Image (spheres, rainbow, N blue to C red):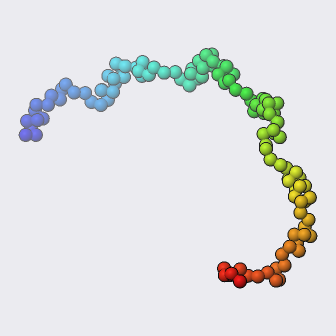
């Protein structure tokens, strides 16, 4: 069966890999197959087409901070007392000496959960 297969195969009508590659190179040129730009061509076209400042519609960090500072005051945003504002009314309300003598830990009873 192998002999019949070899006889039926026409060796004359075939090409070697080298011949096949040479014919393919003659038939088509790689630059015709690739429809693209090189990196330098692409960069040049992009620079001609647009300006980066035209694309970016934003503020710099300094401009943004300036606009935000002009628009809002931090004290209006924070609805809280400062430490001094909190301590002053509390100091006026309770005297430490009154609180120190309030509980005598030497004679405090232990709570055991039963009524006395």
Quick check: can you spot residue 66?
A: no
In the rendered image, the residue lying farthest to the front is 116
Residue 105 as seen in the image, left or right of residue 50 = right
Q: Nearer the viewer, residue 60 or 9?
A: 60
Q: Position of residue 83 (x, y in %)?
A: 85, 53
Question: What residue is drawn where x is 66% and y is 24%?
Answer: 56
Which quarter of the picture shows residue 17? top left
- Name the quarter where the C terminus is drawn: bottom right
Q: Nearer the viewer, residue 19 or 102?
A: 102
Decide: is 81 above or below 68: below
Q: Position of residue 112 (x, y in %)?
A: 68, 81
Decide: is 88 above or below 30: below
Q: Nearer the viewer, residue 62 or 23?
A: 62
Q: Position of residue 86 (x, y in %)?
A: 85, 53
Question: What residue is drawn where x is 7% and y is 40%?
Answer: 1
Q: Nearer the viewer, residue 49 or 100?
A: 100
Question: What residue is drawn where x is 90% and y is 67%?
Answer: 96
Which quarter of the picture shows residue 63? top right
Which quarter of the picture shows residue 94? bottom right
In the rendered image, the residue lying farthest to the top is 48
Quick check: can you spot residue 38?
A: yes
Number of callouts: 0
Q: Position of residue 73 (x, y in %)?
A: 82, 36
Question: What residue is drawn where x is 69% and y is 22%?
Answer: 53
Residue 70 as seen in the image, left or right of residue 17 = right
Decide: is 3 above or below 86: above
């Amino acid at each position: 069966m192998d002999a019949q297969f070899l006889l039926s195969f026409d060796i004359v009508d075939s090409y070697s890999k080298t011949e096949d590659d040479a014919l393919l190179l003659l038939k088509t040129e790689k630059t015709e197959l690739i429809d693209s730009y090189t990196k330098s061509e692409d960069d040049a076209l992009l620079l001609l087409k647009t300006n980066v400042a035209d694309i970016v519609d934003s503020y710099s960090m300094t401009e943004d901070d300036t606009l935000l500072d002009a628009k809002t005051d931090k004290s209006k945003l924070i609805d809280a007392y400062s430490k001094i504002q909190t301590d002053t009314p509390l100091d006026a309300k309770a005297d430490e000496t009154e609180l120190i003598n309030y509980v005598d830990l030497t004679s405090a009873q232990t709570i055991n959960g039963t009524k006395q």
